[in-house]
Image (cartoon, grey):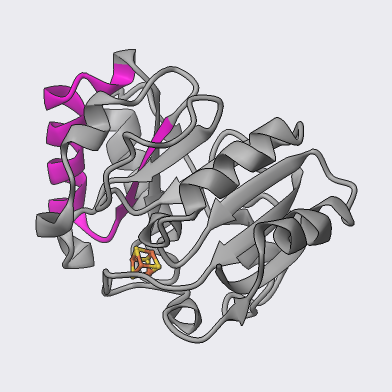
Amino acid sequence: MKVTEIFHSIQGESTYAGRPSVFIRLTGCPLRCTWCDTAYAFYGGRDMTMDEIVAETRAFDCPLVEVTGGEPLSQPDSLALLTRLCDEGFEVLLETSGAIDTAGVDRRVHVILDVKCPGSGMTERMHWPNLARLTPQDEAKFVIKDRADYEWAREVVRREGLFTRCTVLFSPVFGDAEARQLAEWVLADKLPLRFQLQMHKYIWSPDMRGV
Ligand code: SF4
């Protein structure tokens, strides 16, 4: 498999935010979100076997592991990697763009599914059946750039009945959207979701790799 980096950090998003976690960042992504902060994962990467990935992950002695990218599911072996990590006893998160079918993902994995708002420029790439697969152990994440994104996300959440099926995360585009404004919209509409900021970008530098 092609691996951009494996590192130990604080989980910065989702209901797991604040927990120490190992991140396995797989190389490659077929999308090009306007606000992407991991373009360095589009190309290159180290060739690693699954055994090498697991050994490097295990060396951090941390029970929580997130497989991310790029878009991790763009590498077909990622499905076997997710199952292997579960079999090894890790608590496993998958951060995925929403564009690739999640049907083959091991059900022990907690899926954090991006739903690409119009401001990302990638809405038409969404694989919508992925939303129907979300369960209470999963999370749907909307990164909001402006009011148009917010209204679009609010409509999708209601149309898909997401509030009753999984955790819903709304976060502002880092350094672009106004966090306070988004928080006020959420409160005004009484949406039962989890508002979040990307904690790791406040702890470390926003453009730093491996955090
Ligand atoms: S899906 Fe993720 S890695 Fe791919 S372009 Fe969008 S933000 Fe970047």
Q: Is residue 13 visible?
A: no
Q: Which segment is the magenta one? A: 139-163
View extreme (top): residue: 164
Compared to 200, does 180 lie above or below? above
Dominant SS in magenta: helix
Across and down, in percent, residue 113 comes to 37, 42
Q: In which quarter of the view is residue 37 placed?
A: bottom left
In the displayed structure image, the side of residue 182 where residue 87 appears, left or right: right
Depth order, front residue of 127/147: 127
Residue 50: tell me if it is visible.
yes
Q: Position of residue 71 (x, y in %)?
A: 40, 61
Residue at position x 43%, y 80% in the image? 39
x 25%, y 35%: residue: 130
Q: Quadrant of residue 203?
A: bottom right
Q: Image quadrant for the N terminus?
A: bottom right
Dividing the image into four equal quarters, which quarter contains ligand 1?
bottom left
Q: Residue at x 74, y 57 (%)?
A: 51
Percent across and percent down for residue 170 are 37, 42
The answer to whether residue 16 is above or below residue 10 is above
Q: Is residue 150 magenta?
A: yes
| Quarter of the C terminus within the rendering | bottom right
